[in-house]
Amino acid sequence: MLKSEPAFEEVTDMATTTVQTKPELIYPETDGQPMADNTTQFECIVTIKGNLEILFASEPNVFVAGDLLWYPEEGHPEIRQAPDVMVVFGRPKGHRPSYRQWEEGDVPPQVVFEVWSPSNRLQQMLEKMDFYRRYGVEEYYIYYPESGQWDGWRREGEQLVAVAQMNGWQSPRLGIRFAQGAGTMVGLSYPDGRRFLSFLELGQMAEAEHRRAERLAAKLRELGIDPEQL
C-alpha cells in the first residue's frame, strides 16, 4: 500500500499595512495670559475695540477683534500673537475661536493696537513688532495710558516705519485721527471729528436721548398729538 504524500498546509503571510496619520494639531484658543493687567488697560482696550466696531458696523466685511489669537501659518501653532485689538478688512464679521489666517483667505490683520501695561517689557514689544512686520500688518499703534501718548508705525515695503508726529495723524486704513489722550480717554476720534467714547459715556448718551424723546412725546400728547402716529 502506497503511502500518501504528506499534506502540506499552505500558509499565506498576511501583510499588515499600518496607516500612520499625523496627530491633529491643536491651535489653542487662549495663551493663558489675562486680557489686561489692570482696569485702566482693560477699559482702553474695550473703548478702542468697541468704537471701531461702531465705526464699521455697516461694513459686513470688516472684522474687529480684541485679544484674539492670530495664527499666521498652518501647521505652526507655536507661531501666534494676540493683539489687544486688530482690524481685518476683507473678512466677514462673526465669532471665531481664533484667527487662522489660512482659513481666512490668507488675509492678515491690517491694523493692530496694543495698550501698554506695567508688565510690558521693551524686548517683548520689539518681538511683537517684528511679528507684525513679518506677517503683513500695515499699521501698528501703541497707547500709553499713563502719559496719554501714542506711538505708531506704518508699512513701507517690508518694513514698519515710525510715524514722526502722531498728534493729528490720520490712519490711512481706518480714517480715525490720533491726539493726546488722558488715561482711559484714548484721544481717538472718528473721521467726522467725534471722539471715541467709553461704554459708560455711550450708555449715558443713550439714556439722555431716551429721556429727551420721552419729554417730547409728553409735550405732543399735551397738544393732542399722538407721537406714535408721526
Image (cartoon, rainbow, N blue to C red):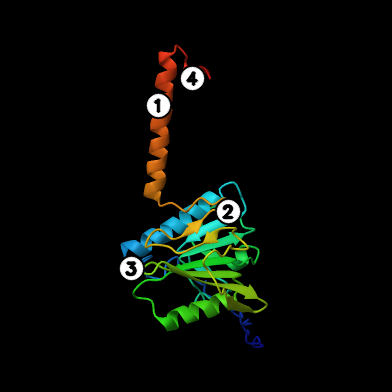
* Residue 14 position within the rendered picture, expressed as x and y whole percent measured from the top left: 61, 79
Q: What whole-number distance in Å separates the C-alpha atoms at marks 4 and 2?
A: 35 Å
**Residue for badge 2:** 191
**3 vs 4, front mark:** 4
Reading the chain from its start, which is encountered first: label 4 or label 2? 2
Q: Residue at x 41, y 41 (%)?
A: 205
Residue 214 — which label? 1
Vertical position of residue 110 compared to residue 64: above or below: below
**Residue 228, which numbered label?**
4
- Residues packed near mark 1 inside 10 Å, few (<14), some (14 to 19) or many (20 plus): few
Residue at screen point 38% across, 69% down: 147
Q: In which image quadrant can residue 176 be found?
A: bottom right
Distance (Cα) linking label 3 and label 4 = 49 Å
Q: For the residues marked 2 and 1, what is the alpha-carbon distance in whole angstroms?
A: 31 Å
The relative height of residue 102 versus residue 196 in the rendered view (above or below) is below
Among the 4 quarters of the image, the one containing residue 39: bottom left
Q: Amino acid at mark 2?
A: Pro
Q: Amino acid at mark 3?
A: Asp
Q: Earlier in the sequence, mark 3 or mark 4?
A: 3
Determine whether 53 is above or below 137 in the image.
above
In space, the residues marked 4 and 1 are separated at their CA atoms by 12 Å
Q: Residues within 10 Å of mark 4 (few under 14, many from 20)?
A: few
